[in-house]
Every structure is written in structure tokens, then in C-alpha cells.
Image (cartoon, rainbow, N blue to C red):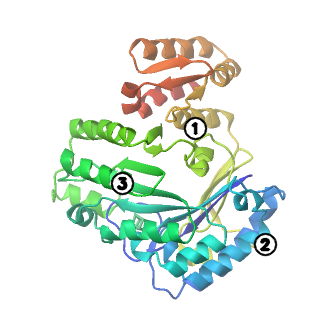
Amino acid sequence: MRSLYIHVPFCFHKCHYCDFYSIVDTRDRQEPFVERLAAELSAQSHLSGGAPLRTIFVGGGTPSLLRPDLWTRLLGVLEARFDLSLIRRGVGEFTVECNPETVTRELADTLATGGVTRVSMGAQSFHAAHLKTLERWHHPDNVARAIEVAGGAGISRRSVDLIYAIPGQSIADLERDLDAAASLPVEHVSAYNLTYEPNTAMTHRLKRGEFTPADEDLEADMFTLVGERLGARGFSRYEVSNYARPGAECRHNLAYWRQEQWLACGPSASGHARGIRWKNAPRLDDYLSYSDEGWARASEVEPRDARRAVRERIMTGLRLREGLPIDWLRSRACEHGGDTESRVQRAIDRMDEQGLLRERDPAIVLTDAGVLIADALAARLMKMFL
Ligand code: SF4
């Protein structure tokens, strides 16, 4: 267990597209939350076996909403309970997600002093009108300011998140967003198409006919534009929706996509250890009121399942530029038995003929055309491991 995810559930407003667990911050529960989190971190720290952590990612929610004094407390617990030597030496990575509106010099100094090496800034768009469509509350000008403040505090690794295919967004609008993001002193850009998750306000508005969503062709054109425009500015795609300057890939997310193991603390946090997946119960009140020697109540536990593990590795591995190791896939197909190995090979050959995938020893890697339908291609292989 060399990675740790922490979920901070507070936001100052619920964005309409968001289906992450978060609640509007009333400030009165930040302190009990951090104390409860400290207990859970202590309990889970034993699973790391004293080995140095390679990556920490604090997401949410809006972690940058936590008061600086509570950040000091949280960072102190991490220092006391885990070996952060790799992170301190810059070999590891410690990311905190930030809303640009909340980044102050005091907060940035606190994070940097406590070992944070990377911030992920939620920009989403640099057009106020599109932020309004998303009901995202921050001023576009604050993104550059927040990135500067983080850099001034010594946090040199910085990323911005964008959303595209926003209703009403044109290709020209997206070009301006991409140029604005790439002009910032950042090493990494995440660009996700807007998705309509069940039970979000955005989906309810869509069902009420309040706007017209981007059509599939426009979305595909935008996806291509993202790759080309960021590519021209030195950011290359290393995962379907993630772009980095050389060597600046998000190591924590790579651990997820490579299906490594990670600890997870906080309400709704999902972890993966020794083949078992679990998700903490999401409600903050439950999280605060329940503790089994520090452990949180899990709302979902999936026991070790070799076939599920293969399917998950296919799903996330195919999305990576490094691809899926071909020897690993053949071995899993062989273990699966029957004619799985030949069926998998036929599927790969077919995708190769269709120009969707290339077999490049030691991996199979999607082509640009394949990346557009990565999930569908993964599904073709995954169904052979049911
Ligand atoms: S700030 Fe992030 S976590 Fe909070 S509501 Fe918006 S998208 Fe969701």
C-alpha cells in the first residue's frame, strides 16, 4: 500500500454536474471531521506496513475549504502516522484539489510546509457564462491568481481541470479555454467531457428541456481538438482525458489506472487493498458518529475476485497511452481457460484491422480512432472474462 486517498466532503456550493459526495460547508463540522479523519488515518496506517508512501491525493469536495489550522493538524497526523520521506524528497507526490476561489497565501504556505507538492485546480472553463451553466462558483480570473499563489509558496507541480461539451459551448469557446489553460504555468491538464450523471441537478435540468446538450459529433470534434491543441503546446495525452508535459503525469492517478493498491479515508472514499475493494459510507453524520477503533463503516465491500480484477485492469489499462501489457493479457486469458486465449487474440486482431488498436510489444495500445471509443473496445475484451 503505497498510495493514500483522502476525501474532504465540504464545498461552498453544489455544482450542478457533480455526483461526488459533498455537502455545503457550514464550517461547524470541519473540526470534528478532521479529528475523526485523524483516527481513521491512524487505523489505516498499519496497512502501509511502515513503507514510505509514494502518493497522497486529497480530493473531494473542496479540500482547500478546510481552515489552515485544520490543515496543519491533518498534515501533522500524516507526518506522524506515515513515512513521507519519498514525498519530501520529491520522488513521491502529494496532491491537493483546490477551488481557485479558496486559495490564499496562508493556505498555500501551510500546504507547502506540510509537504504538499502538487495542486489540482478546478478551472472547468474560463468563460463566466459556461461556468454559470454548470453552476460552478468561481471567477475565471481567480484561476491564474490561485496558480500563482501556489507557485509562490513553492508548490511547483500544478494542474488544471477543464470540462468541455458544455451546453452552448462552441469550438471557438473551447479553443480559448484550452489556450488559457495551456498559457498558465502548469504541467498538467485534465479535460473531461461533461457527463450527465443520474440524480444531478444538471441531469434534471436536461430532462426538463432547459438546454440542448452537445451532440455526439460535436463532442467527438471537441475531444480531437483537445488533443491537438494541447499537444501543440507540449502536453501529450497519457490517459484518455489527461495530458501532461514530459514526466509530469499524475502518479497517484496512474496507481489507480494500473490497478495498484491504495488506502482511502473519509466519507465515500474508495480503497483497494489485497484484492478487496471497499467504499466508506458517504454521509458525514454517519462518518462522524461511527468508529470501530478508528475504522469507518464501509457501505460497499467487494471481496477478492480474480476475474473482476482482470476486467478492471482492461478497462483502465486500455485508456492509458502505455496500453495494456500483452503478456499479462495472454496469461490471464490462458488462466481463464477454454478458448479464451484465441478469442482474445481474434478480438485484438480485428481491432487492429479496423485501425483501432496496435499491438506494440510489450503492450496493446489504442490508436487515436480507438481512443474515441475506448470504453466500448474495453467492453469487447472484458466480456471474455465474465
Ligand atoms: S466543487 Fe467539486 S466536489 Fe464540490 S460540488 Fe463542485 S464539482 Fe462537486
Q: CA distance from mark 2 to mark 1?
A: 34 Å
Residue 222 x/y as whole percent: 27, 41
Camera-side mark, 1 or 3? 3
Q: Residue at x 68, y 53 (%)?
A: 262
Few, some or many residues within 10 Å of mark 2 (<14, 14–19, 20+): few
Report whether residue 328 is seen: yes
**Mark nearer the N terminus (1 vs 3):** 3
Q: Which mark is residue 158?
A: none
Q: Amino acid at mark 1?
A: Glu
Left or right of residue 242: residue 292: right
Query: Which residue has dot 3 on it?
Result: 183
Residue with the mark numbered 2: 80
Q: Secondary structure at mark 2?
A: helix
Between the C-alphas of marks 2 and 3, the distance is 38 Å
Q: Position of residue 173 (x, y in %)?
A: 21, 51
Q: Residues within 10 Å of mark 1 (few under 14, many from 20)?
A: some
Q: Residue at x 29, y 39 (%)?
A: 225
- At x 34%, y 61%, the residue is 200
Compared with 40, 353 (above or below) is: above
Disc 1 element: helix
* Mark found first going from the N terminus, 2 or 1: 2
Toward which corner of the image does residue 264 lie, by quadrant?
bottom right
